[in-house]
Image (cartoon, coloured by chain):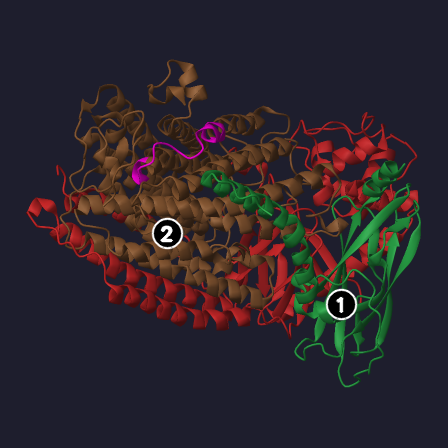
């Protein structure tokens, strides 16, 4: 033996373990409370249960490991040929075999008891105070708050991290890849039932701090529930490979006080009712132009100019797109420009009513005078393909 | 039968038409090493992209192709053929048979493999790219939403499945019919035992995989709806069928590794294997249990709670026979006269790391906790501990252990030990931190990650490059041994080794045991 | 059935080939139907029976009220506006209940849809009996047309006591192309 195991262990492994420990402590210092080396107990009672179950089993495994590896390393150190030992020849013992079959079995039973009770608790979704239908899409989530009386509140939740950060053109923000344009909002200390399904392929809705992970399966509905006990913002990600942008469909859940939630949902319901009404409506050109001007001034003016004369962006007055085929016009507004990253996809940022209004406005203002108009339902259908 | 006593034919036709178990074994081993390098190259691309946050080298779509091909190539191209190659070389020599029972089929089962993988690898260059739905190819991502190359993928899986089935039928037929007189079942070396059980698993489950991909093919091209809810099917059915194959597959990969370790540890402990009988029974129980635990891969699909409980209890039970095996190996070492040549080092590495993988496996079996572990990097760490430190380490041990017997030359021991230590450090540096990022919430199969996972991912990538580089050393050591190793003609290379393979001359002649040996 | 050959190798091999072929067949003739049976029996995935329930005269349990929620999801590429006329109903076990789902085809082409039901919690699925459902059949709808799609159901009196809310979800799929290709094939 040119190198003793022990010496190698000290020389090679110990520095590695030290490096690991150092890195982990520095990482956990910069990240506020969340451990970067262990499971998060999270902010639900069930999460706590799962965490303590995890720790219990981990420590049982560590204890068994210490004994097993202890025996092995003792043997490696003391029963080596280089020490001139004579090998014994024993090679069977039924008693020993029975012992190490039966003892582990009882250890397993000890593990199974808390596991069973936690599992039964996780499966108890009754008495939920509210229901949210979660639908996985390639590659975003939609949340629909089911309301027994009146309009459901429904919105999409998209990744907010800009492409420039992902492709290293800009510095990455603190919540890189874990930030969305519109988070799910739920009240604290309220049992929320999540009904989970998918629109295309299988996704999985995972928020570690809420101790929920459930697959979203197209055509079928799954349920999960969670009672968050602390106000805060909790982040998660899709956990089932769902195609190209699987890594880019985060989940953000904003747990707020009950009062704050009541205010938020009230606003959302009013907005939803308004949109629903508008969607059904047939607007006159004047109505669309008026609303379109507001939207234009808010979202387009900075680049395209107050009179559509252009600037950072191309001119809209007299543009081939605004005076061309309606489909092409909707395409660039809804999906953005493939050639120019500055022209963003507004389909996700504006609602259908605003989109229809601003497109109509662009086609008829600045002397374009196309005379045609776009209704919200047209945009809705265009988006659906 | 006339040319029975001739040596090998000359040139390419020796390899193309050979029916000799040693030639075929050699080809399997080289092929699997080539696939190991290919799958390793894919892994290097994955780790390079994950070296730091942000997209640097590849696009997300290509990243998914890399993870998919890495998994498929490593499982079906590297690990499985490597053990089949080892079985070809060693089983006839261990049971005192002149060759495999079906030498011509043996040739076929090897030669259909390279085209299958050529086809699979060629999908990288077709329109729409290679399969990008993960090695588990869950429907409907692999059916309705798959790239056109999925059809090539299905064909390739059919061919390699056929190869495996033919290979295992051959092994079963050999073990059951070709043993030397006196070689009773309970006298067979454990490597033969584990392979016999593995071969039965393969015959039982490879057709299930073939069934699954056939259903995919029908859904994609012939309008059936096995896995599509629109036509009354169910995507979850795919997962049940896949894992009914997939879980025994896990043991198909690890059981021969158990066999190898059970040969090598006694040799370097200079003491007989402790608890031979219980090893056989434990292997058989693991094989049996593997058929009734598949849905523990699917705790989050929304099974009824009763199903969830059943699969949890059944899965936990696997810890018992697995524990028995680990205890037996350690007791074999106890009060032996240990020495630490390269094969033994890899076996001890196996023992430590596989046990850690077993512990995380036990943790994963606990359904409520699995809701937090599932599809996170914790799972990635777990199965690399059992597949790389389990299967690949023991395979490497086997090569060092039997290489002198195969080619009559001794490998360079210092280089072998260096290979072990670099592998061991590189491996742990790669995969140990993945436990941490998984527990902290990093999902698997993502091309980019949040900033809090950055440090550990960088460590992982550095470790992966080290581990990858150590395989070049392995290749060099093996080639250098074959070309210019120190010749040896001792029949028994290792003083503690037992078994018929050590009674034939070194290097092992082209034909061995043409007259059956006498078995005590 | 098996020809036992005098050559033991041939004997072993033929048995193993039969096993392999048998396992391949097992997937199709056992696993698929067995899974469907288990789904129907245990309500795996919240699947409900795909055929009408023939009502047995039942006592209406007025002492219990169960809330039934209706949700609708469009699968990818399905442009219909589709949803329940009421989002929830309070019903008594044993009673026959009627409701309708509303569908509008906004495109100027004739289409065919298939709605797939799913019940949550899944263990309630076996107690949710549909005596009439639009999901039993393909639903054709002319371009720009609207329709009401009827649903009639009974909640079984044996519904476990702890279940107070049942969610019935429909996912609607566009199967126009599948039906068209069938027609082409039939021709």
Side (left or right) of C59 relative to B297: right
Pointers 1 and 2 in contact (C-beta within 8 Å): no
Query: Is residue A227 shown to the viewer in this render?
Result: no
**Residue bounds of the magenta highlight:** B93-109
Q: Which mark is residue B357?
A: 2
Residue B30 figure quarter: top left
Q: Is residue B285 above or below residue A263?
A: above
- Residue C106: x and y in percent read 88, 46
The chain coloured green in the image? C
Q: Residue furthest top?
A: B11
Is B69 a magenta residue? no
Q: Residue at x 21, y 25 (%)?
A: B409
Side (left or right) of B483 relative to C79: left
Q: Colour of chain A?
A: red
Query: Is residue B102 shown to the viewer in this render?
Result: yes
**Labels 1, 2: front one:** 2
- Describe the element under mark 2 as helix, strand or loop: helix
Nearest the viewer among A320 and C72 is C72
Q: Residue at x 42, y 44 (%)?
A: B253
Nearest the viewer among B380 and B481 is B481
The residue where tag 1 is placed is C69
Q: Chain of mark 2?
A: B
Q: Residue at x 90, y 52 (%)?
A: A281
Is B98 a magenta residue? yes
- Residue B87: x and y in percent read 37, 37
Q: Chain of mark 1?
A: C
């Amino acid at each position: 033996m040119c190198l003793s195991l022990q010496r190698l262990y000290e020389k090679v492994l110990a520095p590695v373990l030290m490096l690991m420990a150092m890195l982990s402590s520095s990482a956990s210092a910069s990240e506020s409370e969340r451990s970067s080396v262990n499971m998060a107990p999270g902010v639900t009672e069930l999460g706590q249960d799962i965490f303590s179950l995890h720790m219990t089993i981990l420590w049982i495994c560590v204890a068994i490991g210490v004994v097993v590896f202890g025996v092995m390393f003792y043997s490696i150190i003391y029963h080596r040929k280089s020490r001139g030992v004579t090998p014994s020849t024993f090679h069977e013992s039924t008693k020993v075999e029975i012992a190490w079959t039966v003892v582990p079995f009882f250890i397993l039973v000890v593990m199974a008891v808390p596991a069973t009770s936690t599992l039964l608790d996780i499966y108890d979704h009754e008495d939920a105070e509210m229901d949210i239908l979660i639908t996985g899409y390639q590659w975003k989530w939609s949340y629909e708050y089911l309301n027994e009386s009146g309009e459901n509140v429904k919105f999409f939740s998209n990744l907010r991290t800009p492409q420039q950060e992902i492709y290293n053109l800009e510095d990455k923000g603190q919540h890189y890849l874990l930030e969305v344009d519109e988070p799910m909002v739920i009240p604290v200390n309220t049992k929320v039932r999540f009904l989970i399904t998918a629109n295309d392929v299988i996704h999985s809705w995972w928020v570690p701090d809420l101790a929920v992970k459930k697959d979203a399966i197209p055509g079928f509905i799954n349920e999960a529930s969670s009672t968050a006990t602390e106000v805060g913002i909790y982040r998660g990600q899709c956990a089932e490979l769902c195609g190209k942008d699987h890594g880019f469909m985060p989940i953000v859940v904003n747990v707020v006080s009950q009062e704050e939630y009541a205010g938020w949902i009230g606003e959302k319901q009013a907005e939803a009712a308004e949109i629903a009404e508008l969607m059904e409506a047939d607007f006159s050109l004047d109505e669309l132009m008026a609303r379109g001007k507001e939207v234009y001034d808010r979202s387009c003016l900075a680049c395209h100019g107050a009179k559509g004369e252009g600037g950072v962006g191309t001119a809209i007055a007299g543009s081939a797109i605004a005076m061309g085929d309606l489909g092409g016009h909707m395409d660039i507004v809804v999906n953005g420009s493939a050639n120019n990253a500055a022209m963003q996809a507004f389909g996700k940022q504006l609602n259908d009513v605003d989109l229809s209004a601003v497109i109509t406005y662009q086609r008829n203002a600045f002397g374009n005078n196309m005379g045609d108009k776009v209704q919200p339902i047209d945009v809705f259908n265009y988006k659906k393909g | 039968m006339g040319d029975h006593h001739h040596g090998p034919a000359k040139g390419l036709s020796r390899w193309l038409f050979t029916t000799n178990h040693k030639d075929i074994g050699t080809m399997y081993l080289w092929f699997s090493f080539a696939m190991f390098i290919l799958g390793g190259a894919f892994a290097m691309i994955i780790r390079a992209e994950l070296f730091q946050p942000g997209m640097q080298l590849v696009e997300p779509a290509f990243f998914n192709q890399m993870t998919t091909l890495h998994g498929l190539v490593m499982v079906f191209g590297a690990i499985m053929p490597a053990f089949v190659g080892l079985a070809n070389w060693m089983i006839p020599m261990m049971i005192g048979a002149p060759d495999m029972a079906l030498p011509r089929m043996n040739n076929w089962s090897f030669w259909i493999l390279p085209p299958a993988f050529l086809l699979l690898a060629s999908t990288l260059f077709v329109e729409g790219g290679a399969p990008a739905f993960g090695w588990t190819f869950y429907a409907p991502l692999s059916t309705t939403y798959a790239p056109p190359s999925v059809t090539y993928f299905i064909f390739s899986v059919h061919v390699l499945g056929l190869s495996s089935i033919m290979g295992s039928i051959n092994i079963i037929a050999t073990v059951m019919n070709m043993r030397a007189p006196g070689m009773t079942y309970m006298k067979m070396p454990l490597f033969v035992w584990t392979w016999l059980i593995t071969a039965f698993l393969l015959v039982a489950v490879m057709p299930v995989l073939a069934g699954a991909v056939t259903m995919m093919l029908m859904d994609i091209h012939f309008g059936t709806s096995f896995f599509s809810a629109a036509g009354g099917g169910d995507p979850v059915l795919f997962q049940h069928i896949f894992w009914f194959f997939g879980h025994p597959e896990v043991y198909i990969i690890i059981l021969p590794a158990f066999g190898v370790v059970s040969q090598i540890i006694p040799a370097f402990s200079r003491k007989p294997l402790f608890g031979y009988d219980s090893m056989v029974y434990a292997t058989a129980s693991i094989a049996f249990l593997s058929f009734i635990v598949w849905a523990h891969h699917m705790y989050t699909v929304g099974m009824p709670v009763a199903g969830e409980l059943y699969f949890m209890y059944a899965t936990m039970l696997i810890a018992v026979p697995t524990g028995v095996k680990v205890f037996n190996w350690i007791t074999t070492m106890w009060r032996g006269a240990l020495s630490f040549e390269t094969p033994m080092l890899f076996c001890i590495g196996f023992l430590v790391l596989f046990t850690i993988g077993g512990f995380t496996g036990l943790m994963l079996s606990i359904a409520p906790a699995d809701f937090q572990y599932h599809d996170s990097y914790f799972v990635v760490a777990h199965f690399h501990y059992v597949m790389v430190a389990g299967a690949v380490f023991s395979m490497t041990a086997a090569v060092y252990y039997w290489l002198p017997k195969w080619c009559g030359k001794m490998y360079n021991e210092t280089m072998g030990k260096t290979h072990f230590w670099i592998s061991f450090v590189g491996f742990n540096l790669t995969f140990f931190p993945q436990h941490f990022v998984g527990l902290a919430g990093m999902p698997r199969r993502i091309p980019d990650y949040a900033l809090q996972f950055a440090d550990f991912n960088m460590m992982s990538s550095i470790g992966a490059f080290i581990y990858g580089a150590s395989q070049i050393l392995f290749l060099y050591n093996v080639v250098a041994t074959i070309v210019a190793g120190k010749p040896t003609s001792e029949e028994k290379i290792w003083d503690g080794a037992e078994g018929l393979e050590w009674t034939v001359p070194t290097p092992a002649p082209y034909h061995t045991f043409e007259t059956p040996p006498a078995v005590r | 059935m098996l020809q036992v050959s005098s050559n033991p190798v041939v004997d072993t091999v033929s048995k193993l080939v039969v096993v392999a072929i048998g396992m391949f067949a097992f997937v199709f003739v056992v696993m698929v139907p067995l899974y469907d049976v288990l789904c129907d029996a245990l309500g795996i995935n919240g699947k409900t029976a795909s055929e009408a329930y023939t009502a047995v005269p039942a006592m209406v349990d007025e002492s219990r009220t169960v809330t039934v929620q209706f949700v609708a999801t469009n699968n990818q590429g399905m442009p219909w506006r589709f949803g329940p006329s009421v989002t929830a109903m309070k019903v008594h076990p044993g009673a026959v209940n009627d409701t309708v789902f509303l569908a509008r085809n906004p495109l100027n082409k004739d289409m065919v849809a298939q709605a797939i039901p799913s019940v949550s919690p899944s263990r309630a699925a076996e107690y949710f009996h549909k005596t009439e459902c639009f999901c039993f059949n393909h639903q054709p709808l002319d371009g720009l047309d609207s329709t009401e799609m009827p649903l009639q159901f009974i909640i079984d009196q044996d519904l476990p006591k702890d279940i107070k809310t049942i969610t019935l979800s429909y996912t609607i799929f566009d199967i126009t192309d599948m039906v068209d290709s069938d027609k082409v094939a039939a021709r």
